[in-house]
Amino acid sequence: MKKSMITAVLILAAGLFAGQALAVEQFKEQRIIRSGETASIKGSDKFFTGNVRIDPVYPANNAMRSSGGSVTFEPGARSNWHIHPVGQVLIVTSGVGLTQEWGKPIQEIKAGDVVICPVGVKHWHGAKPNTSMTHLSVCEDKGDGVVVEWMEKVTDEQYSEYKGN
Ligand code: MN
């Protein structure tokens, strides 16, 4: 496969945060995605508040429906409220951040923590007010390429329920 093609596929895989249907790559042999091969993507203002960088990690492939992306939230940045139609696993790889389920208190998450988000549970995730956080996000779709359903922004008032810094 040409490098430009895999790059395009990985950018589509980042649709997990861009609200696009995801591409599924049909690999016929081992595919090593080399570090530095894939361009970073700026998180859309439609789905995020603040500065967010998405680094695609791997696309869905063959019969394997999961795809992965590394997401870095600068201080104060966070996702919109959203749900995942097949759930999500977040593996915090750097820093300390925040996550919240609708109607529940904001919780801190730090490097090494793993968050399992069940199907249909409304939530958000992001950085703390003064520090950044990076997590690996692993999602699956139901065969339609949809891994997230985006909702309204997390308001400053909602975000300020977190009393730390
Ligand atoms: Mn999520």
Image (tube, grey):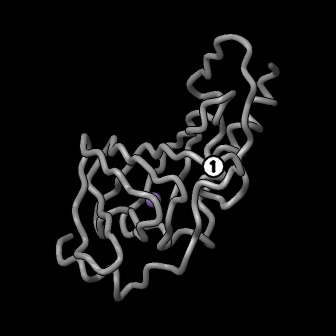
Of residues 138 and 162, which is closer to you in this image? 138
For ligand 1, tell me if the residue under mark 1 lies within 8 Å.
no
Dividing the image into four equal quarters, which quarter contains ligand 1? Answer: bottom left
Residue located 41% across and 60% down the image: 74
Quadrant of residue 11 within the rendered picture: top right
Q: Residue at x 56, y 35 (%)?
A: 57
Does 58 appear above or below 122?
Answer: above
> In this view of the protein, which residue sits in the foreground, 105 or 119?
119
Which residue occupies 33% across, 45% down? 92
Q: Position of residue 151 (x, y in %)?
A: 55, 76
Looking at the picture, which amino acid does disc 1 mark?
Lys
| Left or right of residue 121: residue 146 | right
Location of residue 21 with respect to 99 vertically, above or below: above
- In the rendering, at what x and y percent does residue 115 appear? 31, 51
Tell me where residue 1 appears, x and y as whole percent: 80, 19
Give the residue at x 81% y 30%: 5
